[in-house]
Amino acid sequence: MGILESINWAIIAPIVIIQLILMAVAINDLVKIEKANGPKWMWALVIIFINLLGPIIYFIFGRRS
């Protein structure tokens, strides 16, 4: 029995899909806005490399009102 067969995909798949959607929306928003709180390249790294929480952190702290 391989490791892929032992994973409960019913739990993992929705989390992965939510992560991908959040990343896509956050990156799209980052590209479209004129200015962010801090350098855009830094926010792009946060969105991409901090799984699930990165896009949420961006939407809370990175966007200028």
Image (cartoon, helix red, strand yellow):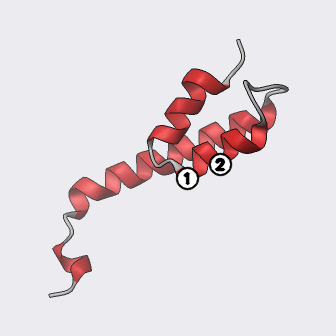
Relative side of 56 to 6, left or right: right
Toward which corner of the image does residue 38 lie, by quadrant? top right
Relative side of 39 to 22, left or right: right
* Residue 20 versus residue 63 in the image, above or below: below
* Residue at horizontal 46 percent and vertical 49 percent from the top: 51
| Position of residue 8 measured from the top left corner of the image (x, y, whole percent) | 19, 64
* Residue 50 versus residue 55 in the image, above or below: below
* Residue at horizontal 82 percent and vertical 25 percent from the top: 35
| Position of residue 20 measured from the top left corner of the image (x, y, whole percent) | 51, 51
| Position of residue 55 measured from the top left corner of the image (x, y, whole percent) | 54, 38
Toward which corner of the image does residue 11 lie, by quadrant? bottom left
Relative side of 34 to 42, left or right: right
In the picture, the disc for residue 45 is 2
Front-most of 42 and 4?
42
| The N terminus: image quadrant | bottom left
Front-most of 62 and 18?
62
* Residue 32 versus residue 63 in the image, above or below: below
Disc 1 crowd rating (10 Å Cα; few below 14, some 14-19, many 20+) is: few
Q: Which residue is mark 1?
A: 49
Which element carries disc 2, helix, strand or loop?
helix
Toward which corner of the image does residue 6 lie, by quadrant? bottom left
Give, as a three-letter code, the residue at label 1. Phe
Which element carries disc 1, helix, strand or loop?
helix
In the picture, the disc for residue 7 is none
Q: Tell me whether circle 2 and circle 1 mark residues in contact (CB < 8 Å).
A: yes
The Cα–Cα distance between marks 2 and 1, rounded to whole angstroms, is: 6 Å
Front-most of 28 and 54?
54
Give, as a three-letter code, the residue at label 2. Leu
